[in-house]
Amino acid sequence: MNSLTLKAAWQEGKVTVGTWIFEFNTPGIARLLASTGVDFVVFDQEHSGFGIDTIRGLLAQTRPLNLAALVRPPANEYFLVAPLLDAGSLWYHHAECPDCRRSEETHGSLSVHAAGETRGGLRRGA
């Protein structure tokens, strides 16, 4: 299941099955997961030593396998989340956030609105 079909399944309320990866940075992990039939994988940066370079490699492994990939960043900060989306993560899972307002601010800074409104230095092309 790729990112688009996963999003559609969630919007339709369908059940999907995924798994979390904390420790297994191995070249065959995406192929192994795809062979199990899971719909998605979440790579966890908050509880692992995965840096952005590791995450880029893991995300690249999932693309040819049609395995939707999500990432949990170490914190809800723009400078940590934006590179994950740039690298191809479908979505990011909010790290623990005692103040949800901060999480909403981060999400808002990553949004590009249809009207072309600029937020966080992003602007939708005309």
Image (cartoon, helix red, strand yellow):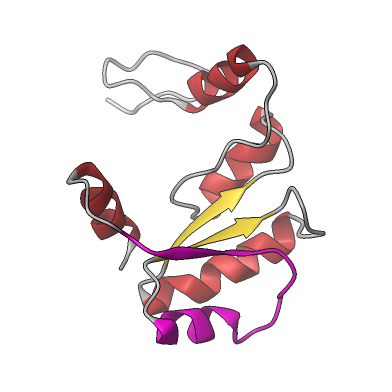
- Depth check: give the residue in front, 64 or 97: 97
Q: Quadrant of the N terminus?
A: bottom left
For the point 61% across and 59% down, the residue is 43
Residue 41 location, x and y as percent?
50, 64
**Figure check: 19 above or below 44:** below
For the point 50% across and 27% down, the residue is 110
Q: Is residue 31 magenta?
A: yes
Residue 35 location, x and y as percent?
42, 87
Mark yes or no: residue 3 visible. Answer: yes
Q: Quadrant of residue 55?
A: bottom right
**Figure check: 82 above or below 88:** above
Q: Quadrant of the C terminus?
A: top left
- Depth check: give the residue in front, 119 or 17: 17
For the point 58% across and 52% down, the residue is 71
Residue 74 location, x and y as percent?
74, 42
Magenta extent: 16-36
Mark yes or no: residue 121 visible. Answer: no
- Depth check: give the residue in front, 94 or 17: 17
Relative to 37, is 126 on the left or the right? left
Residue occupying the far front of the picture: 15
For the point 17% across and 46% down, the residue is 12
Residue occupying the far left of the picture: 12
Q: Is residue 125 magenta?
A: no
- Depth check: give the residue in front, 109 or 47: 47
Q: Quadrant of residue 48?
A: bottom right
Residue 85 location, x and y as percent?
52, 45
**Figure check: 19 above or below 113:** below
Relative to 28, is 40 on the left or the right? left
